[in-house]
Amino acid sequence: MSGIQLIKKFTTFAVDRTFSHNMSPRSKAQIEEIREASISKILNAALELFAIKGFDSSSIADIAKKANISKGLMYNYFSSKDDLLKALIDQLNKGEKNMMANIFDEDPKKMLENVIRVFFKELRENYQQWVFISKLVLQVDRFEFVSTLAKEMYSNYLILFEQLLTGIGMKQPSSEAKLLGAMFDGIGYQFLIIKDEYPLDEIENYLIQKYCEDEVY
């Protein structure tokens, strides 16, 4: 039996024993709620540490300490740091898909305005997430699943941008979609570097005016 398996076995035994002596058995719903809460704490702690220290410099012990749980409990949910990274990426990807579904509009100009506003809102409200993503992108060739997901997301965004720009009458929607995607990337990186001094409001309003209010060309 490996060291990790021993930790898992001991942790499960200790938790079960505590429950059996100190409280009545939990329902399946309660157990699942506790499980989801623990996973959420772990993922939030991992996101913060990966953003601040980087993936390589953040250990499982660091993440467990940040999440205020035992290292053994960590291994009940994630077999390795790579496994934890995959779960974190999956969570962020699901959140983005839900976000995009919520801003749908049949009017292409309104839909594009929603996309622009959400992009800037995410920059303002989820700074650590953007730092984490930017660091991960620089190591995209190291993790095959990250590379695959990044290419898929890039392709999906280009398709979306091209469809919206076609809908509003842009003459060269394919090229303009690539330009808009590049602008989003550049804005994100510049904001991470300059932070509070970056003119987010000015750039956001300019893009909305350019693509959603002015006559297209």
Image (spheres, rainbow, N blue to C red):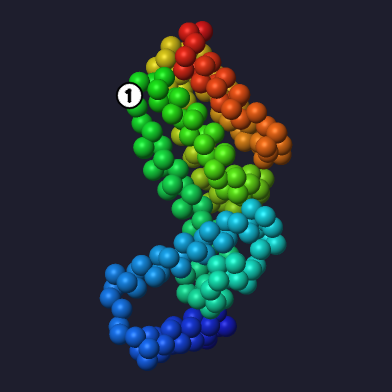
Asked if 149 appears above or below 5 in the picture, the reply is above
Nearer-the-camera pick, 177 or 49: 49
- Percent of width and height locating residue 143: 59, 53
Asked if 9 appears above or below 210 in the picture, the reply is below
Quarter of the figure with residue 58: bottom right
Nearer-the-camera pick, 24 or 132: 24
**Residue name at image x 51 percent, y 21 percent:** 208
Determine if residue 182 is in view: no
Quarter of the figure with residue 48: bottom right
Nearer-the-camera pick, 174 or 130: 130
**Residue name at image x 49 percent, y 39 percent:** 153
- Percent of width and height locating residue 122: 52, 40
> Callout 1, which amino acid?
Glu
Asked if 178 appears above or below 18 in the picture, the reply is above
**Residue, disc 1:** 106
**Residue name at image x 67 percent, y 45 percent:** 138
**Residue name at image x 53 percent, y 15 percent:** 210
Q: Secondary structure at mark 1?
A: loop
Left or right, residue 55 beside residue 85 = right
Left or right, residue 169 beside residue 65 = left
